Amino acid sequence: MTDAPRRFDTRDIARIAVFAAIIAALGLIGPIPVGPVPITAQTLGVILAGMVLGAWRGAAAVAVFLALVAVGLPLLSGGHGGAGVFVGVTAGYLFGWIPGAFVTGLIAHSGRGRLSWWRVALGGVVGGILVVYALGIPVASLVAKLPLDAVMIGNLAFIPGDLAKIAIATALTMTLWKAYPPVFGARRERALAARTAPAAADATDASAR
């Protein structure tokens, strides 16, 4: 079961704000230029938001961050901001962060019970790489006026770094799951309920006998 698209409560809003701030803070790490699209640490925050907050809240955290960028705050790596970044060569990747975080959370939080590291990591690969690249590559090709296959080949340089970010985000997520459950909100509560339900049922059966 995944987190439902219900109305966010005050705790949800606080979590969303915290992760939007985390994505912004990762922008303090300067970009690594590898062509028209640089390598940045902020995708780590995007992936982590989906893994920890789930689909809807993770996507909301990214959307809040991008809204702040759109109004002019220089929160992107390298101190960039403003509406102009959403029509540049990296625009597709930025827009891809929202569905990327959503899909990451959707896969990571699927199923019942506790989070499993392999599902969390799989969510990072599908959402953080495949979904973001699916939007980023065509837009970069169009804006930079480069052949699509050339941009796809150029994106191979990002794969090792993205896999490292997914490994880091997975380790952080599983550590938080054990060390600080409240950050997961209702997802953690459902996991605890699923774990205690069989025990309660067994106790009821025993007393009935």
Image (cartoon, grey):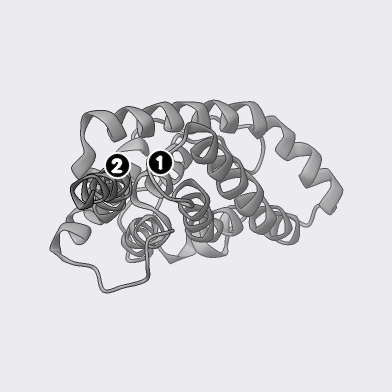
The amino acid sitting under disc 2 is Ile
Q: Is residue 85 shown above or below 9?
A: above
Q: Identify the element where label 1 is drawn.
A: helix
**Residue closer to the observer: 13 or 132:** 13
| Residue that numbered label 1 is attached to | 48
Residue 85: image location, x then y, percent: 49, 58
Residue placed at 55% from the left, 35% from the top?
39
Indicate which disc residue 129 carries.
Answer: none
- Residue 151 is left or right of residue 115, and the answer is right
Residue 208: image location, x then y, percent: 21, 52
Q: Residue furthest left?
A: 10
| Residue that numbered label 2 is attached to | 22
Residue 77: image location, x then y, percent: 42, 41
> Does residue 112 show up?
yes
Q: Quadrant of residue 23?
A: top left
Q: Are circles 2 and 1 on residues that touch, CB within 8 Å?
A: yes
The amino acid sitting under disc 1 is Leu
> Does residue 21 show up?
no
